[in-house]
Amino acid sequence: MIIKKYIGKTEEEAIGLAKADLGEEATIMNTKEIVPHGLFKFFRQLSFEVTAAVDEIKQTNAVPAQKEPGISETPDFSKLQQVLNEQQFGPAPDSKTAQKEAERERLLKSRHILEDSMDDDSVDREDSKGIEQKLSTLQDLLEKQMTLSQDGEKEEKERIVDKNQAYLDLIRKQLIQNEVEECYVEQILNEIKGTLGHNTTLDNILAGVYQKIVLKIGSPHLIDLKTKHTKYIFFVGPTGVGKTTTIAKIASMMKLAKKSKVALVTSDTYRIAAVEQLKIYANILGIPLHVVYAAEEMEKLKDGLHDYDLVLVDTAGRSHNNKEQKEDLCNILRTVPESDKEVFLVLSATTKYQDLVDITNTYSGICRYSIIFTKLDETSKIGNIFNIHILTGAPLSYVTQGQNVPNDIGKIDAQKIAKQLLGGNS
């Protein structure tokens, strides 16, 4: 794993430097605005520091636990540490091993002295017999000592393995309690096992697992406004996940914070309440809302939306088991070329994992998408966010945690998710 820091005049410039150095696969782990202090504030401008990381294909024997330059502070895992401290693994064998080695050296030295004395012509036969007996005794002692030393080394290796395994078992339990799928837990722990050393502490192992999770989640995929053409953003997903409210939050964010020219379109004519809800938000924000009933109307509407930076399209909540509704959705999506659109699949963090698997499989057969998770405030178990990301390979983007518009929305934070999954302070 390679972790570096980059500084630029803007956040985009710093990220660009990171990508140029580490490649497009680099994960942006942290961004920080650097404000000059004291007299320097009159001579220096604001700058931005970016911490980026990339996972190496082959790792060396270095223990991931040691703090590398640029990595964010390891989260507080005091609860896990307290549990582990109650387990006993026996005293460190360093002094015993040294004593055994010294004793073996002493016996070897004694044997060499006796062998040299047997070569002396002044030694008579009786003395020779006595020396042979002593040599035989020393040989037995030496072999016994070597056997004990080998047994001690074997016990030490087993003790180290047992200690590391106890740490890994505790981390496994914590991740599974947070509803991370067991197969993904084993995948992470197996990647860590090969890097563990003789004196690896729980904090060091936790830091390695934490960094693995952060890198696997990656950077959030957000709406990109750097385009010359009108960008169409389609929001799809099952009923009841908070799709319409999420669209209102993003519209507010783009209009007020990004100063973008935004229009709303809804094809969710199955629920009158959804149209009325969007109308209220549109009036407050001072942006237009268009209602379409079929793909043909969407085609005609596009001609009047060329002047807008962003068009957010609310689609009807569909049952992933209804083929006719899936075809209607496909027709709406086909009205915009791939280069001018993005699709966001909106999912609830409270949905059961197997249902999420069925939903994502259905939409994977329709389009490529990024994922928005809603209702994080309604669950304490967020393992499914990690599970679905690994299962689908789809980028994570925004998360919502409440009903307030334009608040209660933000981009996915890999570090925060990793800390929560490991039981640390978020």
Image (cartoon, rainbow, N blue to C red):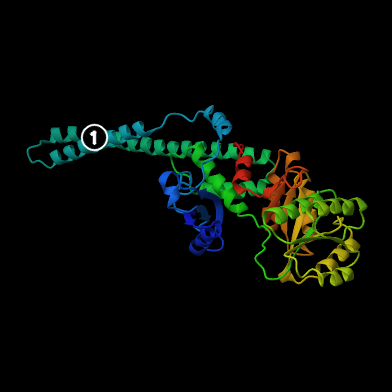
Q: Residue at x 47, y 49 (%)?
A: 70
Identify which residue, 113 or 236, lies in the foreground: 236
Say if 118 sits above or below 211 in the image.
above
Say if 140 sits above or below 393 in the image.
above
Q: Give the image location of residue 224, x and y in percent.
A: 67, 62
Identify which residue, 84 or 286, lies in the foreground: 286
Place residue 108 in its image quadrant: top left
Q: Give the image location of residue 234, x and y in percent.
A: 78, 61
- Tell me if I can see residue 62 in this picture: no
Side of 309 relative to 330 (left or right): left
Place residue 290 in its image quadrant: bottom right
Identify which residue, 372 or 181, lies in the foreground: 372
Q: Residue at x 60, y 54 (%)?
A: 218
| Mark 1, other Cα within 10 Å: few <14 / some 14–19 / many ≥20 | few
Side of 147 relative to 216 (left or right): left
Q: Give the image location of residue 386, x and y in percent.
A: 67, 49
- Tell me if I can see residue 328 in this picture: yes
The residue beneath circle 1 is: 106
Residue at the top extreme? 86
Side of 19 relative to 359 (left or right): left
The C terminus - image quarter: top right
Determine whether the residue tagged by mark 1 lies in a helix, strand or loop: helix
Q: Residue at x 52, y 54 (%)?
A: 52
